[in-house]
């Protein structure tokens, strides 16, 4: 649309320029001569005006000799046509009352308004290729406009012999502007350079340059109507050549626009074809996507279920692993696949066993023995959860607990083991021995504090083991102790005295295997109020979980023994 408006405006400006030249020549000869039929020239201009697709109001001075910045008026198509017809009638019927200056100023003001409107239309063009052509087209129109105005001053010079200083300055300005505009056009449309070179290589152009050079000197001369007509004819031929360039540029613009439209039509056709293909294929795609979405949803549900199951199994395995190994050691083993051995400077170790366990095991069935030990050590395991200790292992009736590792706790391990030993001793006293009537379980306890080395041993069912003389000494305290008493070493006694809050009783010197005579003590109680415990009875529900399975599905070749 912008290109169409620009080309239509260009045609109107061209027709008005030609009309201005004919009218100026007609007035110069006082209406006695015409280069062409004025009526036909007016008709051609009107035809160009009527062929314009759109018309925007243009601003022109209210009088031809006024500056356009001082007083302006807006003309629509009808007003413009009416003003144009009035001016034509005055020129044709009263040529002697019209001057060339008035004619030039009037047409110049109209063309200026049209060229301004053309410039505004070109600014709205967003296509870079056609924008360059349109700017070149506009500049070529301005070049012809400036050349026509300069020609009017040249005709006056040759027709009257001289130009006033003001007219001479105007001539030089318009002549310079005409050259600059044609150079600008050639820069925007370089394909016109060869055509313009052919124009400048003609004899007529060289004669035109000679007469322009003479005019630039502005030396007083004798008025010569023949020279004025010759100059007029040469300049009109030159502007006609420029209009040939204008037609060529208009043709280039049309070709470029047609090419762009063809490309747009081709892309539109491709887009429509793609749209048709998409519309045809979309039902199939929708069905496939629906099936894929259903499959993915089902897979996601299964995956979510499997993830939950895996999470549950992981919690089970972690729980089992944390029961076999200290949590900190287990996490390190899972992350690095190895746990280096470590020396602990101060650790307290607790050992205990059941007095007369060998005789008890001999009188009871294996199932009763397992159930008996499970009931006791389940209570022990629940009790030690209240303390900062780690259950190392259970071998037969021997129960081993340590504090101060694998996470060091300062000297807290001493009071933790001492309090735990008193708690376990209290808890064990309520268990009855199976097949022994009202006899209660009695345990021996041994405690020692000192340095140990700890680390993971083995790859199949790895265990967190403790090594060192502290372990052996604690075991000796347990084996040389007495029923329902906590046997401690002198080092443990001294540490408890430093901690405070515990009461001990000196046992004396005893001979310890591998250690010789040692001064040992009994840990009797802890200062403060005595904690009242609920009675714990040995019940059938305190048996290992796997025994429930045996009761529900006993093997065919094995029967549960009857209890007496």
Image: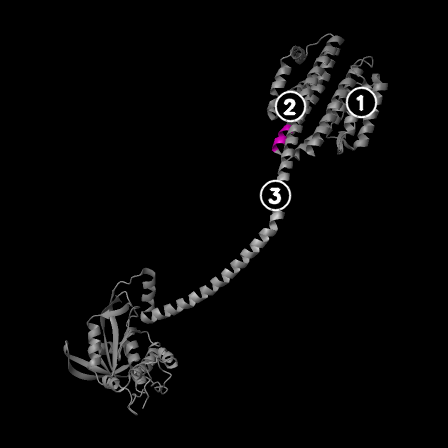
Q: Nearer the viewer, residue 218 or 412?
A: 412
Q: How is the image coloured?
A: one colour
x then y, percent, for residue 469 = 19, 72
Residue that mark 1 sits on? 42
In three-dimensional space, the C-alpha distance between marks 1 and 3, rounded to whole angstroms, equals 53 Å
Q: Residues within 10 Å of mark 2 (few under 14, many from 20)?
A: many
Q: Are marks 1 and 2 in contact (CB under 8 Å)?
A: no
Mark toward the start of the polypeptide (1 vs 2): 1
Q: Residue at x 72, y 10 (%)?
A: 230
Residue that mark 2 sits on? 181
Q: Please identify the quarter of the rendering in which residue 431 is found.
A: bottom left
Residue that mark 3 sits on? 274
Magenta residue span: 128-133
x then y, percent, for residue 54 = 75, 34
Q: Which quadrant of the figure contains the C terminus?
A: bottom left
Callout 2: SS: helix
For this orientation, the residue located farthest to the left is: 516
Q: Residue at x 82, y 22 (%)?
A: 88
In three-dimensional space, the C-alpha distance between marks 2 and 3, rounded to whole angstroms, equals 47 Å
Q: Residues within 10 Å of mark 3 (few under 14, many from 20)?
A: few
For this orientation, the residue located farthest to the right is: 93
- Specify whether residue 177 is painted magenta: no
Q: Examine the rendered structure and indicate whether residue 392 appears above or below residue 103.
A: below
Point out which mark residue 256 bears: none
Q: Nearer the viewer, residue 505 or 452?
A: 452
Q: Examine the rendered structure and indicate whether residue 441 appears above or below residue 188.
A: below
Q: Which quadrant of the figure contains the N terminus?
A: top right
Q: Please identify the quarter of the rendering in which residue 217 is found.
A: top right
Q: Nearer the viewer, residue 510 or 113?
A: 510
The answer to whether residue 136 is visible is yes
Mark toward the start of the polypeptide (1 vs 3): 1
């Amino acid at each position: 649309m912008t290109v169409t408006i620009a080309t239509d405006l260009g045609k109107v400006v061209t027709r008005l320029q030609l009309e201005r030249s004919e009218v100026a020549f007609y007035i110069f000869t006082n209406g006695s001569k015409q280069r062409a039929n004025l009526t036909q020239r007016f008709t051609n201009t009107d035809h160009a005006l009527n062929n314009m697709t759109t018309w925007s109001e243009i601003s022109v001075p209210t009088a031809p000799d006024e500056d356009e910045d001082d007083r302006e008026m807006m003309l629509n198509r009808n007003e413009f046509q009416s003003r144009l017809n009035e001016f034509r009638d005055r020129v044709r019927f009263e040529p002697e009352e019209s001057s060339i200056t008035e004619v030039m100023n009037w047409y110049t003001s109209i063309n200026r308004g049209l060229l301004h409107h053309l410039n505004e239309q070109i600014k709205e063009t967003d296509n870079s290729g056609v924008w360059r052509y349109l700017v070149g087209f506009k500049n070529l129109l301005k070049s012809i406009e400036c050349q026509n105005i300069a020609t009017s001053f040249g005709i006056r010079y040759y027709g009257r012999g001289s130009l006033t200083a003001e007219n001479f300055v105007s001539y030089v300005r318009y002549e310079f502007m005409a050259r600059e505009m044609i150079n600008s056009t050639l820069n925007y449309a370089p394909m016109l350079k060869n055509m313009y070179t052919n124009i400048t290589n003609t004899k007529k152009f060289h004669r035109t340059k000679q007469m322009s050079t003479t005019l630039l000197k502005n030396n007083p001369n004798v008025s010569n109507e023949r020279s004025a007509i010759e100059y007029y004819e040469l300049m009109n031929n030159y502007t006609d050549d420029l209009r040939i360039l204008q037609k060529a540029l208009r043709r280039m613009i049309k070709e470029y626009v047609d090419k762009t439209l063809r490309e747009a039509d081709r892309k539109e056709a491709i887009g429509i074809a793609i749209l048709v293909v998409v519309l045809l294929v979309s039902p199939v795609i929708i069905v496939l996507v629906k099936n894929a979405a259903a499959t993915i949803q089902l897979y996601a549900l299964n995956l979510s279920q499997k993830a939950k199951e895996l999470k549950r199994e992981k919690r089970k395995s972690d729980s089992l692993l944390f029961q076999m190994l200290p949590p900190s050691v287990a996490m390190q083993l899972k992350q690095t696949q190895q746990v280096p051995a470590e020396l602990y400077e101060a650790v307290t170790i607790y050992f205990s066993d059941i007095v007369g366990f060998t005789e008890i095991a001999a009188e009871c069935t294996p199932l009763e023995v397992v159930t008996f030990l499970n009931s006791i050590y389940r209570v022990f395991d629940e009790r030690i959860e209240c303390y900062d200790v780690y259950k190392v292992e259970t071998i037969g009736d021997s129960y081993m607990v340590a504090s101060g590792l694998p996470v060091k706790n300062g000297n807290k391990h001493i009071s933790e083991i001492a309090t735990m030993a008193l708690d376990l001793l209290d808890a064990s006293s309520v268990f009855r021995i199976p097949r022994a009537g009202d006899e209660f379980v009695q345990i021996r306890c041994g405690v020692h504090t000192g340095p140990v080395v700890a680390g993971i041993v083995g790859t199949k069912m790895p265990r967190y083991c403790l090594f060192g003389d502290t372990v052996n000494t604690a075991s000796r305290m347990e084996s040389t102790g007495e029923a329902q008493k906590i046997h401690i070493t002198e080092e443990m006694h001294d540490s408890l005295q430093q901690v405070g809050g515990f009461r001990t009783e000196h046992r004396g010197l005893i001979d310890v295997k591998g250690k010789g005579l040692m001064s040992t003590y009994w840990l009797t109680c802890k200062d403060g109020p005595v904690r009242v415990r609920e009675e714990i009875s040995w019940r059938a529900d305190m048996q290992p979980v796997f025994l429930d399975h045996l009761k529900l599905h006993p093997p065919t070749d094995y029967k549960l023994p009857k209890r007496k």
